[in-house]
Amino acid sequence: MFQARDILDTNKRDKMSLDRAHYEEKSLDYFSGSRPEIEAVLPEQCSKVLEIGCGAGQVMARIKQTRKIVRSVGIDLMPAAIEQAKLIFDEATAANVETSDLPNEQFDLIIALDVLEHLSDPWRMIQRLHALLVPGGTIVVSLPHVGHWTVSWPLLTKGQWDYTSEGLLDRTHLRFFSRRGAEDLMTSSGLVIEKLQPDRVYPAWMRRFSPSFRWYAGRIFEMIFPSHLLVYRFLIRAGHIAPRQA
């Protein structure tokens, strides 16, 4: 079992504690959720999985229902979430992934869902995770999109950029990504993007209607406005090698 090893000096450790305080204000629900939308980018087969920012472990629990997982490791900042995750993972550790050692083993799937935007240096983290991949392994991430209309419209029309307790302008977000920025991040260590799935979130009034109505309304919306305004996050799978030609 690997041990989380703090590699910061005293002043930086104090800063890390202050950062954790922001997360301690959040309810446990913030660290939960099975994220069924990631199924669109998960590889069909995987056996050894590392999840950073694993929360209480619901994502891994869902993956284990559909795939034969022989080894699962989870890391999360919050000890309360890790206590629940221990019931699901083979190994679950409370640690700050930026200031601690990562597991000394390799994986065929690494998951980081809505994690990288919380880090001071997500580019360095991608390099570190890349080094943990077996040949042919993949990294699956979810990255919030700063161009969604709920962020860009208030900024454009009112000059407002107001941080909130969760969502796209969560006050714990340190980095913000457009589609190009997300692609640059995921390819910065030499990985190749195999699949990128925009995850659209519609205005509240549209969510009252059926999925088919929302689909047609979305197409009409995109004929009038830039299509990226509806994209809330990017789901990305990147791997060692170029994807096979169809």
Image (cartoon, grey):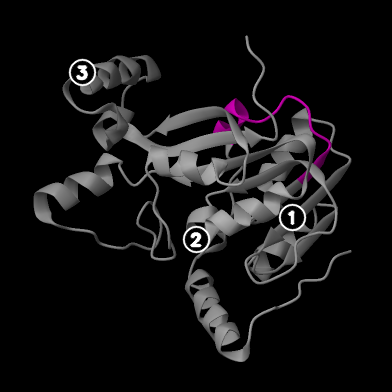
Estimate the x, y position of residue 11 in percent, counting from the top left. 56, 89
Magenta residues (range): 36-49
Which numbered disc, 2 or 3, marks the residue that appears first in the sequence? 2
Residue under pointer 1: 74
Taking depth in this image into account, of 26 and 143 the one nearest to the observer is 143
Residue under pointer 2: 118
Residue found 61% across the figure and 57% down from its top: 125
Residue under pointer 3: 223
Which numbered disc, 2 or 1, marks the residue that appears first in the sequence? 1
Q: In this rendering, would 40 be left or right of 212?
A: right
Taking depth in this image into account, of 193 and 218 the one nearest to the observer is 193
Element type at mark 3:
helix
Residue found 10% across the figure and 48% down from its top: 157
Measured in 3D between alpha carbons, the distance from the residue under mark 2 to the one under mark 1, in whole angstroms, is 17 Å
Callout 3 crowding tier (Cα within 10 Å): few <14, some 14–19, many ≥20: few
> Which amino acid is tagged 2?
His
> Which amino acid is tagged 1?
Gly
Element type at mark 2:
helix
Locate residue 228: give its quadrant.
Answer: top left
Callout 1 crowding tier (Cα within 10 Å): few <14, some 14–19, many ≥20: many
Locate residue 100: give its quadrant.
Answer: bottom right
Callout 2 crowding tier (Cα within 10 Å): few <14, some 14–19, many ≥20: some
Element type at mark 1:
strand
150 versus 31 height, above or below: above
171 versus 63 height, above or below: below
Estimate the x, y position of residue 150 in percent, counting from the top left. 26, 45
Estimate the x, y position of residue 165 in percent, counting from the top left. 38, 63
Measured in 3D between alpha carbons, the distance from the residue under mark 2 to the one under mark 3, in whole angstroms, is 34 Å
173 versus 155 height, above or below: below
Q: Is residue 233 magenta?
A: no
Residue found 71% across the figure and 63% down from its top: 82
Residue found 66% across the figure and 43% down from its top: 59
